[in-house]
Image (cartoon, grey):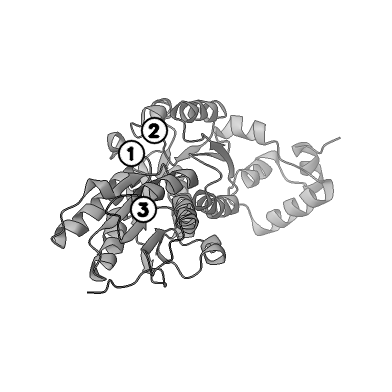
Amino acid sequence: MASTMKDLARETGLGLATLSKYFNGGNVREKNRRLIEAAVKKLHYVPNEVARSLKTRQTRVIGVIIPELSNAFITSIISSMEDVLRRHDYAVIVCDCRSDPKREKEAVEFLIHRRVDGLINMATDPTGAHLKAALEANIPILLVDRLIKTLRNKVSAVIIDNEFASSQAVSKLLDLGHRKIGLVLGSPRLYTTETRLAGYLNALRNAGVEPDERYIRYGDYTMDGGYQAVQELIGLEDPPTALFITNFEMMLGGMLALQHNGIEIPRDLSVIGFDKLELFSGIFPNLTLVRQPQLGIGRECANLMLETLSSKGTAVPRVITLSTELTEGTSTRALEP
């Protein structure tokens, strides 16, 4: 039979109020703390989390809703996020909505019914309609990687400076003499897609190059999408001399398309990718890449959520913007005059 709080009280000689204070995170005397921890170990006591959540109205569970669990960039963020939350005694429920707005809305409803203390969302639905019920329930919401225009000043977020990252990569290609630069973007209407497109266009215009819509393709942030987009670009009558591919999965697909067509990098085509992940170095070494601080994104998300929860509703929503780094490899070269 499982031990109870009364068993702990008999073992330690302490009152139930002191024990309750300890298990709910309150301060107790050092002598009493040692007594309680020794008794917990001896009696194999496990706190009744359900009862505690009913009393404190906290479940110490954070819901995380993502578009694709198979995405390496996303899983690295979740891992670092969970490490921080776990150290603060929070568990995580991850819901993969498969980039489906209907599933995303259902995931929000599921997590509300599970009474999560907070929601962290890499949004698929750019309108933010799926989060309406959570907002009405006053559940703290944190957006990661993707802002939602309708929720500005209503929820916090952790993002990177996508526009600068894109502009920096395209400027690098422009400095090497490239003017016909192909761009492979994710899904239309998403914040990351729009801001990376803006950076691309700004870099071209600042260099006096008129953007050409023929060189812009959408790959839906998938490997298949990247493969198809690159196939279309290299099949143009006047193909690009360089490519900027704006996420890891699309980069993998794009590189496979280049290999299948016998295109050698950088001799035949210069390429810059996105997301500095270990898998790249094993499959395609020495790529020039825009490096996102994915572990830092996860840590910032966790810390900002903890800060929001500890404020008990008084925190002012804010956006944390992290920097990227362009790491140079051997996948680009200067065009010959």
Task: Return the disc, 1 or 2, that comes first in the chain's sequence.
Answer: 2
**Relative image position of residue 85 (x, y in whole percent):** 55, 50
Residue depicted at x 16% and y 63%: 207
Q: Quadrant of residue 290?
A: bottom left
Mark 3: which secondary structure?
helix
Mark 1: which secondary structure?
loop
Near-viewer residue (163 or 203): 203
**Camera-nearest label, 3 or 1:** 3
Where residue 107 is drawn, which disc sits there?
A: none
Q: Is residue 33 visible?
A: yes
Residue depicted at x 19% and y 58%: 204
* Quadrant housing the C terminus: bottom left
**Relative image position of residue 223 (x, y in whole percent):** 49, 47
- Extreme residue toward the right, this view: 1
User: Which residue position holds label 2?
Assistant: 125
10 Å crowding of disc 2: few (<14), some (14-19), many (20+): some
**Camera-nearest label, 1 or 2:** 1
User: Which residue position holds label 1?
Assistant: 188
Near-viewer residue (146 or 328): 328
**Relative image position of residue 254 (x, y in whole percent):** 44, 53
Residue depicted at x 66% and y 36%: 49
Q: How many marks?
A: 3
Q: CA distance from mark 3 to mark 1?
A: 21 Å
Task: Return the disc, 2 or 3, that comes first in the chain's sequence.
Answer: 2
Q: CA distance from mark 1 to mark 2?
A: 11 Å
Q: Quadrant of residue 317?
A: top left
- Disc 1 marks a residue whose amino acid type is Pro
Residue depicted at x 15% and y 60%: 206
- Disc 3 marks a residue whose amino acid type is Ile
Mark 2: which secondary structure?
loop
Q: Are marks 1 and 2 in contact (CB under 8 Å)?
A: no
User: Which residue position holds label 3?
Assistant: 234
